[in-house]
Image (tube, rainbow, N blue to C red):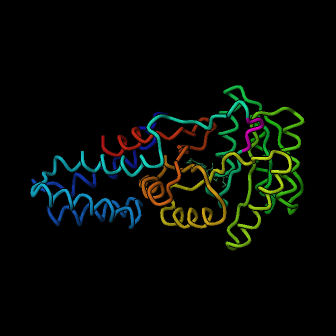
């Protein structure tokens, strides 16, 4: 599926709402701006980022005295691309595994149900397809289902998995996984962690411990911390981003379920507010349904 098709719903929704808001208008007035504000908020762009966009457009209206509605699309595109550009490159960047870093260790965090396991499976598939030797670590030990789900993906992709019993220490699983990866001369390790937001201190302690213990095996692990967020959950995704970035250093985001939502705007707001690049978007349940995020394609898909 193409990105355009995948994001069809977001596109139709945002673009058609916008078209309605400017119908019969020739210039951008307070009415149009009020409507635009509502559309952006209802598209899950987030209040803070929405106000930022509205203020910038107001300033342009004030400076130019007159801003035609025809120009509004173009200006919005520019503003949105501008918000994404601070954290995202235009090119499709992947997790490049540095040659000198072996194994490359990716720690994946996120609450249950957001699509964390699925994203790990899809990533393992991509890395494997690219020729890398991958090992998975089931360090989300709180629920037996989490371990079993990861096992299913490991079998599907045909990569080794390191697991212990439910309830065992996540740091211990992570340690074992890295040792096993080094012994197997693996290129990439993906560690599944912390599927619950108990409280901030616990989360921080758990993730810090996992990191510290991993560093006994690979000194600079993890090389990336990927936070998985469900793009269809709007404000919940913002809240989770807040909690996880407070608990650990998140270096990249994956936003899932953008195939089934009319609210892909969450990518814009989160990218703006947390200054963390969106690396991947999930656009379906299948093994191939993970795309490298490209901001230009993304913005285009909103406005075409
Ligand atoms: P976890 O609890 O965070 O590990 O979540 P799972 O990976 O088990 O995913 C929860 C549900 O969301 C499953 O039914 C997945 O198939 C589904 N899912 C995950 N990613 C996507 C996506 O990008 N699009 C869609 N439509 N469903 C997804």
Residue lying at 66% horizontally and 47% vertically, measured from the top left: 224
Using the rendered view, name the quadrant where residue 20 is placed: bottom left
Using the rendered view, name the quadrant where residue 188 is placed: top right
Q: Nearer the viewer, residue 167 or 249?
A: 249
Which residue of the protein is positioned furthest toward the top in this rendering? 131
Residue 76 falls within the magenta-colored stretch: no
Q: Taken as a whole, is the magenta stretch helix, strand or loop?
A: loop
Q: In the image, 226: left or right of 46?
A: right
Residue lying at 10% horizontally and 55% vertically, measured from the top left: 66
Number of marks present in the image shown: 0
Q: In the image, 8: left or right of 191?
A: left
Give the percent coordinates (x, y) of residue 48.
39, 66
Q: Quadrant of the C terminus?
A: top left
Residue lying at 64% horizontally and 37% vertically, measured from the top left: 287
Residue lying at 89% horizontally and 53% vertically, measured from the top left: 164
The answer to whether residue 24 is visible is no
Determine whether 195 is above or below 284 in the image. below
Residue 104 falls within the magenta-colored stretch: yes
Give the percent coordinates (x, y) of residue 185.
84, 32
Q: Which residues lie in the magenta part?
A: 101-105
Give the percent coordinates (x, y) of residue 84.
42, 49
Q: Nearer the viewer, residue 267 or 154?
A: 267
């Amino acid at each position: 599926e193409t990105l355009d098709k995948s994001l069809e719903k977001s596109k139709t929704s945002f673009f058609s709402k916008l078209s309605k808001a400017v119908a019969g208008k020739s210039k951008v007035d307070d009415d149009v701006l009020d409507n635009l504000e509502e559309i952006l908020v209802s598209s899950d762009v987030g209040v803070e980022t929405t106000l930022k966009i509205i203020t910038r457009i107001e300033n342009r209206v004030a400076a130019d005295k007159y801003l035609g509605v025809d120009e509004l699309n173009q200006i919005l595109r520019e503003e949105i691309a501008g918000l994404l550009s601070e954290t995202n490159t235009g090119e499709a960047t992947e997790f490049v595994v540095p040659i000198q870093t072996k194994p490359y260790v990716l720690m994946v965090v996120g609450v249950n149900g957001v699509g964390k396991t699925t994203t790990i499976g899809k990533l393992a598939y991509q890395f494997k397809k690219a020729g890398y030797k991958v090992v998975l670590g089931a360090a989300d030990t709180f629920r037996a289902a989490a371990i079993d789900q990861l096992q299913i993906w490991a079998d599907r992709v045909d990569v080794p998995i390191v697991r212990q019993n439910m309830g065992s220490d996540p740091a211990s699983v992570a340690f074992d996984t890295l040792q096993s990866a080094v012994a197997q001369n693996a290129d990439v390790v993906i560690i599944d962690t912390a599927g619950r937001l108990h409280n901030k201190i616990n989360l921080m302690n758990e993730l810090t411990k996992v990191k510290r213990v991993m560093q006994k095996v690979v000194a600079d692990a993890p090389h990336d911390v990927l936070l998985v967020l469900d793009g269809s959950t709007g404000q919940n995704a913002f809240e989770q981003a807040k909690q996880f970035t407070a608990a650990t250093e998140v270096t990249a985001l994956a936003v899932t379920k953008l195939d089934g939502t009319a609210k892909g705007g969450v990518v814009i707001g989160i990218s703006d507010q947390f200054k963390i690049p969106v690396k991947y978007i999930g656009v379906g349940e299948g093994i191939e349904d993970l795309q490298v995020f490209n901001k230009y394609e993304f913005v285009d898909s909103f406005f075409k």
